[in-house]
Amino acid sequence: MKHLLSAMLTATAITFTPAVMSCDVKLNNDPKLAKSPSLKITGATVEHLKDLDLMVFSMNLEGPAGDTVPKKAGQLDGAPVLAYVFPTTLKASDVGMGKAEGIVALAITSHPDFDDTPLWDENANGRYDDDKVIYHTHWALLTKDDRVPGGLSVKEFKKEDKTVVLPPTNCGMPMYLDAAGHPVVTKGNTIRAIVPAYYLRNKTEFKFDAVTCYMQVNTSCMAKPMLGVYEVYSVASKDLSLPYKTK
C-alpha cells in the first residue's frame, strides 16, 4: 500500500525519527473486514449545497453503508478503529489546526472501546459517553509514517508544545484530531457527513479522495504511532492521487 501513498504525500515533506527501542503491536483487526462489501468503494462526491451552505461528503459502497463495525478489544491500548476517510487538499488552518503540515482528512469512524466525542450524544439517549461504536466524524491531520503498513498515521505532538493550535472541540489527545460533531447519515449503500461551509473557512473548492481503512490505537509501544493506519481496504482513485473536485 505504501507505493499508493507517494502521490498524495509528495507535497508534504514530513519526516519521522524512529525511537531507539523497538516493539511490536498486536493487531486486533477482523480478517473478515477485508472482504466486506460495506468497505468497498464504488464512488465518492463532495458537494456544496449553496442554498443551505453545507458541504456534503458522500461515499458509495458495494454493500450497506455503516453496517460493518470493529470488534471490541476491551481496552484503549489496541483498540480497533474502522474508518471511511476523505483525504483533501485543504490546509490545516482551514479546520482550525494552525500552520501544521500534513494531509487534512475528514474521517467517519467507529470504535467500540472508547468515546472521544464527549460533547455529542450521537445515539440521542441522554448520555454522552456511550456512543463509541456509532459512526461519527473527526478531522485529522495525517502524516507519512513508515512504521505502519498503511504508511500513514495521525500527526502527534508533545503536550508541552505551546505552539500547537487546535479547535476547542479537539479530542484532548496529543494528536491533531478534532471532534466537531458533524452529522453522519447512512442510507442504503451510501454514507454521508454534513459539514457547515463556515467550518472550512468557506473553502468550498478543493480536491479529495476516498479511502476505507483499519486503524488502531497504541499507548504501550513508543516506537509505533498512537493512531496509525494498518490496513487499507479500498481507495476510490486506486492510487490516492486526490483527483476528484468538489461540486
Image: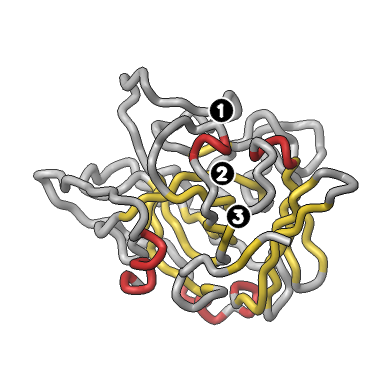
Q: Position of residue 199 (x, y in %)?
A: 68, 36
Number of other residues with Cα within 10 Å of mark 3, as a class: few under 14, some 14 to 19, many 20 or more: some
Please name whichever residue, 36 or 194, is drawn nearer the observer in this view of the structure: 194
In-front residue for pair 211/73: 211
Q: Is residue 46 above or below residue 44?
A: above
Residue that mark 3 sits on: 206
Q: Secondary structure at mark 1?
A: loop
Residue 25 or 51: which is nearer the viewer?
Answer: 51
Res 82 visible = yes
- Badge 1 vs badge 2, beta-carbon distance below 8 Å: yes
Give me the residue at 31% from left, 19% from top: 160
Q: Secondary structure at mark 2?
A: strand
Does residue 239 appear left or right of residue 186 in this picture? left
Residue furthest to the right in view is 51
Question: Mark 3 to mark 1: distance in Å?
Answer: 21 Å
* Residue annotated with mark 1: 167
Considering every residue shown, the one lying at the far left of the view is: 20
Along the line of sight, the residue nearer the viewer: 131 or 201: 201
Q: Earlier in the sequence, mark 2 or mark 3?
A: 2
Residue 35: name its quadrant: bottom right
Element type at marker 3?
Answer: loop
At label 3, the amino acid type is: Phe
State yes or no: discs 2 and 3 in contact (Cβ < 8 Å): no
Q: Of the residues tagged 2 and 3, which is closer to the observer? A: 3
Residue 123 in the image, given as x and y percentages of width and height: 77, 44
Label 1: few (<14), some or many (≥20) within 10 Å? some
Where is mark 2, residue-wise?
Answer: 139
Name the amino acid, label 2: Trp
Q: From the image, which quarter does the C terminus lie in?
A: bottom right
Coloration mode: secondary structure
Q: CA distance from mark 2 to mark 3?
A: 16 Å
